[in-house]
Structures are given as C-alpha cells and as structure tokens.
Amino acid sequence: MAKRKDRISERVLSGAYRPPVRNGKFRSAEQTLAAVTLSIEKLLGALRSMHIVIPDPAAVCDYLLHHEDLVDFLICTCEIVSDRLREVSQLSLELYEDPEIEDRHLTLYARHERYEQHLLDTMDAVSAEFEGELAGKSGWFLLTTDFRPPR
C-alpha cells in the first residue's frame, strides 16, 4: 500500500498527473492523491465482492494510476460480465504485457473447466456491448479466455 501511495504521490507531485477540476477549481495534490487512491481501492473491493480474482493487485493499480478513466468503466463492465458469465468457474483480472511490443492492457480472463461454444459466444456478445465505451479512454480492457483451467 505504501509503495502504491508513493507512486501516486510521485505522479501527482511531478506534474505527470493533471488533477481533475471540481467547481472550477483544481484539487490540491493531497486531494487528488486521496481521490485516486480511494477510487482504485473501491474498485478492487467491488471486484473482490464479485469474486473476481486479482493475482497481482499492484500491477493492476499501477496501470489504473495511468488510466484513471477506466475505474468507473471497470466497475460497470465487470458487473455485467460477472452476471452474464455466471457459469464460468473463475474470472481473473490481470495486466497483460506483450513481450514483443510495448503494449499493456487489463485483461479479464474467463476460465472454466470445459469450454463450450455457447460460453465463447456469450463472451463475444458481452465484449461487443462494452467495446464502444472504450473509445476515448486512455487505456484498454479485454475480455477473453486463455483456455486454462481455473487456478
């Protein structure tokens, strides 16, 4: 937790993060730090309450520090995915880092003991519902499977 706050503080104090404007006034660095930290912590808590596994929360938090506009999107999208894919044995939110090019994005892996066509069709339909909402966001999110069994 302390390391995450240090990274947030570093971004805020270095000017790499542009604080949101509220009522025509910029938030102070401390207010911004508190707001960003709180929104990410609420997201992680909400995802855990949906039984979504987050194997490396620090990596997810670090990504969200650079893409705060995904926080509200993730809460809504993961609720929909969790509801529509109830039969899936495990949903796991992970940071995907491409080994060949400089590309990172959040991926929600749906893992099941047996992969049947209706599950893949449902995943495609759910993805189609939220992909339009990603336009204009600073980061990216993908719903997919790696065809592995639940961990």
Image (cartoon, rainbow, N blue to C red):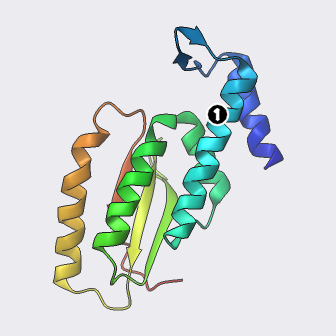
Q: Is residue 53 above or below residue 68?
A: below
Rendered location of residue 3, percent (x, y): 80, 44
Query: Crowding at label 1, few (<14), some or many (≥20) Cα neighbours within 10 Å?
Result: some
What type is the residue that disc 1 sits on?
A: Ala
As drawn, is 131 to the left or to the right of 17? left
Can you name the residue that lies furthest to the right here?
2
Q: Quadrant of residue 33?
A: top right
**Residue sitting at x 79%, y 36%:** 6
Q: Residue 61 vs residue 73: left or right?
A: right
Counting from the top left corner in percent of width and height, residue 138 is at 42, 32
**Residue at position x 38%, y 53% from top?**
76
Q: Is any part of residue 103 visible from this angle?
A: no
In which quadrant of the rendered view does residue 4 lie? Answer: top right
**Which residue has dot 1 on it?**
35
Position of residue 63 relative to residue 150, above or below, is above
Q: Dividing the image into 4 quarters, which one contains the C terminus?
A: bottom right
- How far across and down, in percent of the image, does residue 59 sit? 62, 52
Give how far across and how far down residue 74 sits, in percent.
43, 51
Q: Residue furthest top?
A: 24
Residue at x-position 38% and y-position 62%? 79
